[in-house]
């Protein structure tokens, strides 16, 4: 069985939040075994927000929000995906604002720095969550089915009524190598026809097409895509980030159709209840 791991030394990032548009600094610190992932809001008297299923909040469209004792962390999913995808079990993430920096819209910048400082085994096992019976959660046409499996696999089917994106299907066995090489560079994306509605809802204010997001219009992608099926692969990245709050490896095959953060949260809560 793999051991719990943390990072060897702190790593610092700064940027803007994709939804708030506000500047933010984030520092990832090593943490003792059995800590899991805990955010600390320096601008809120060092309030601690553990990334746990109980702290998942439903108040943010199009991104994940964590909330503990009234203090929130927005858009934690890409930094958490990098940690969980590389096999880190424990880390403290300090922020000086409510939203994690979006950087280039993917998890690659987090991943590269984590690989640069390296990971350290902590002498205690990382006990996997075993899926023993299928778990199914649904929301309209979106569905997640999690089946028993000896490893961690994700299959994602993305379907849009959109000629540019259309249907994309991707399948991965998640290991630190596949995560770093084939998943972490996939960037977040949005459609030009949604932008006005998102901005009216106070979202996507920091979205900068081509810099931290792929913008899709009827003419195509506004920036060269990094690989085929980048949009569906980003959805896999988001699932890894949302499932990171389980803070233990998952032995199961996640099959997701059209799912987003709200349904991912429902699946995580179902796992917590049943496993
Ligand atoms: Zn995302």
Image: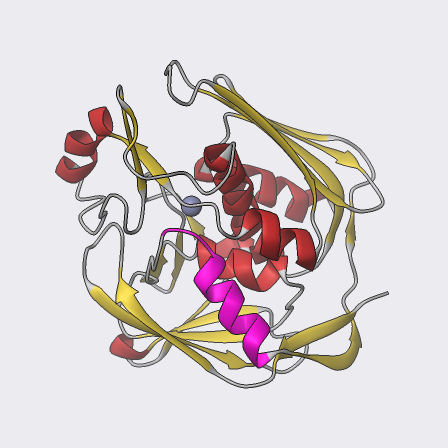
Residue 137 position in % (x across, y down) = 60, 28
Q: Residue 273, position in %: x, y?
A: 66, 45
Q: Is residue 102 left or right of residue 272?
A: left
Task: Identify whether 218 is placed above or below 82.
Answer: above
Question: At which x and y percent is residue 135?
Answer: 70, 32
Residue 81 is a magenta residue: no
Q: Is residue 10 above or below residue 199?
A: below
Q: Is residue 110 magenta?
A: yes
46 relative position to 242: left or right: left
Nearer to the camera, 172 or 164: 164
At x 26% / y 69%, what residue is drawn? 24
Magenta region, residue range: 105-117
In the rendered image, residue 139, in percent from the top left (x then y), is placed at: 49, 23
- Horizontal side, residue 204 vs residue 272: left or right: left
Q: Nearest the camera: 29 or 11?
A: 11
Quarter of the image for residue 128 reads: bottom right
Q: Residue at x 51, y 60 (%)?
A: 80
What is the quadrant of the N terminus in the image?
A: bottom right
Q: Is residue 269 above or below residue 52?
A: above
Q: Is residue 189 left or right of residue 271?
A: left
- What colour scheme governs how the chains and residues are painted in the rendered image of this protein? secondary structure
Q: Nearer the viewer, residue 222 or 184?
A: 222
- Whether residue 138 is visible to the viewer of this picture, yes or no, is no
Examine the residues drawn in magenta and state their main secondary structure. Answer: helix
Residue 69 visible within the image:
yes
Pick out the residue farthest to the front.
224
Q: Residue at x 50, y 30 (%)?
A: 259
Q: How many marks?
A: 0
Q: Residue at x 18, y 30 (%)?
A: 197
């Amino acid at each position: 069985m793999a051991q719990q791991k943390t990072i060897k030394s702190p790593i610092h990032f700064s940027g803007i939040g994709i939804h708030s548009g506000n500047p933010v600094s984030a520092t990832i610190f090593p943490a003792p075994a059995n800590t899991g992932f805990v955010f600390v809001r320096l601008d809120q008297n060092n309030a601690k927000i553990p990334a746990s299923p109980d702290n998942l909040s439903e108040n943010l469209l199009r991104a994940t929000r964590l909330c503990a004792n009234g203090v929130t962390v927005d858009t934690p999913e890409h930094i958490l995906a990098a940690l969980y995808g590389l096999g880190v079990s424990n880390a403290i993430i300090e922020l000086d604002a409510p939203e994690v920096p979006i950087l280039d819209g993917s998890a690659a910048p987090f991943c590269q720095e984590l690989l640069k400082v390296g990971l350290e085994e902590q002498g205690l096992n990382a006990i996997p969550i075993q899926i023993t019976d299928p778990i199914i959660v649904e929301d309209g046409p979106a569905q997640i089915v999690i089946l028993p499996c000896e490893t961690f696999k994700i299959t994602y089917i993305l379907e849009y009524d959109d000629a540019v994106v259309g249907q994309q299907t991707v399948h991965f066995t998640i290991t630190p190598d596949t995560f770093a090489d084939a998943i972490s560079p996939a960037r977040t994306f949005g459609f030009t026809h949604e932008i006005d509605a998102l901005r009216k809802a106070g979202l996507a204010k920091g979205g900068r097409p081509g810099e931290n997001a792929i913008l899709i219009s009827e003419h195509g992608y506004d920036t060269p895509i990094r690989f085929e099926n980048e949009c569906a692969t980003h959805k896999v990245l988001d699932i890894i980030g949302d499932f990171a709050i389980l803070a233990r490896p998952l032995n199961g095959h996640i099959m997701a159709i059209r799912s987003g953060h709200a349904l991912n949260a429902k699946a995580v809560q179902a796992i917590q209840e049943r496993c």
